[in-house]
Image (cartoon, rainbow, N blue to C red):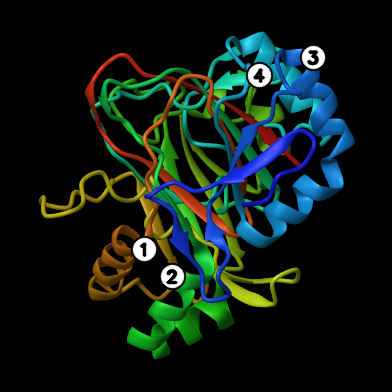
Amino acid sequence: MVIMQFFREVELPEQKSMTDGVLFPAVLSPTAAINNIGAFEEAIKAEKPWLESVLKKSSVILFQGFPVSSPCDFNTVVEAFGYPEAPYVGGRATRVNVVGRVYTANENPMDKRIPFHHEMSFIPNFPTKLIFFCEQEPRQGGETPIVLSNVIYEKMKEKHPEFVAKLEEHGTKTTIIAGDEDDPLAVANRGWKSTYMTDDKKVAQQRAAKLEWMGNIVKMKTGPVPAIRFDEERRVKTWFNSLTGPSCIQLINGEDKTFDKVTCIQLGNDELVPNDAMEDCMRFLEEECVAIPWKKGDVMFVNNLTVLHGRRPLLKPPRRILASLCK
């Protein structure tokens, strides 16, 4: 156990040990020196280099037991880290601003599963860091599972080497058909107006990579973008793509899979993605993930470059998780 002036590193039964013995995720609790949000803010500023070293090793830090009780407190935490805000232009989930840099994580129905994904991996300008906050802990379900992307890459390379080689060579293309209004019942539910934060087609055209208009319906095209990336800090390759993300798969894990008819993801050379590869990928994601039940006040700091995240269905409400995206 590592104990510093402000933070002590603790262990939870859900954590997994990586090959080098580092625990995933890192879990930090406060020492007596942190007894209010101001003290937590100052501790983050004072120990930012050490916290960044922990994030580099573990890819996720779960801050548990700290005095964070409101969206304003969470905004203070986000700003204490000092990272620029990443605008949510081009993202597919409906999110509502709460205060400052704090937004709801996702406005789609809580009983729906959100599959594993890297945030906004299908567009060039994705956030590098995600920070989540539990304002209301779920009574049952509603966890935010996380999984190391390099582990998924290695498993997919071993099981489907030819497919992974094509991914590395060609990347992926994404085509999404969207109307002008959001669909409250869909997992990836934004219309083009909220996706590009405008009701002006010309402005949307400027903010998007490729748009094809059919009246008020639009085909939003991105790519090719890399599907496999190299993590310079840990010197490993990562499974950084949207092939099993919310836009593509609505139901998984033993249920009939329903592919979103308005979304198409294919290889950058226009080849289709084999179903058996995606079924194996979803299985690996579930086998390798960590899902720690949320507690009120939890703050989870995620390296979006190295970790996929999702959401399990909420079985007993309430649940309120807020989020902030950083460059």
Q: CA distance from mark 4 to mark 1?
A: 29 Å
Residue kind at label 4, given as amino acid type: Phe
Q: Residue at x 89, y 34 (%)?
A: 46
Dividing the picture into quarters, in which one does residue 234 lie? bottom right
Circle nearer the N terminus (4, 1)? 4
Q: Amino acid at mark 1?
A: Glu
Q: Quadrant of the C terminus?
A: top right
Along the horizontal axis of the image, is 144 left or right of 170? left
> Relative to residue 82, is residue 170 depicted above or below?
below
Dot 1: few (<14), some (14–19), or many (≥20) neighbours within 10 Å?
A: some
**Which residue type does callout 3 highlight?**
Gly
Q: Which residue is mark 1?
A: 288
Q: Name the mark on residue 38.
A: 3
The relative height of residue 5 versus residue 138 in the rendered view (above or below) is below
Where disc 1 sits, the SS reads: helix
Tell me what residue is drawn at x 67 percent, y 36 percent.
Answer: 205
Q: Are marks 2 and 1 in contact (CB under 8 Å)?
A: yes
Q: Residues within 10 Å of mark 4 (few under 14, many from 20)?
A: many
Q: How far across and how far down the image is residue 163, in percent? A: 40, 83
Could you say which disc has been placed on residue 152 in the image? 2
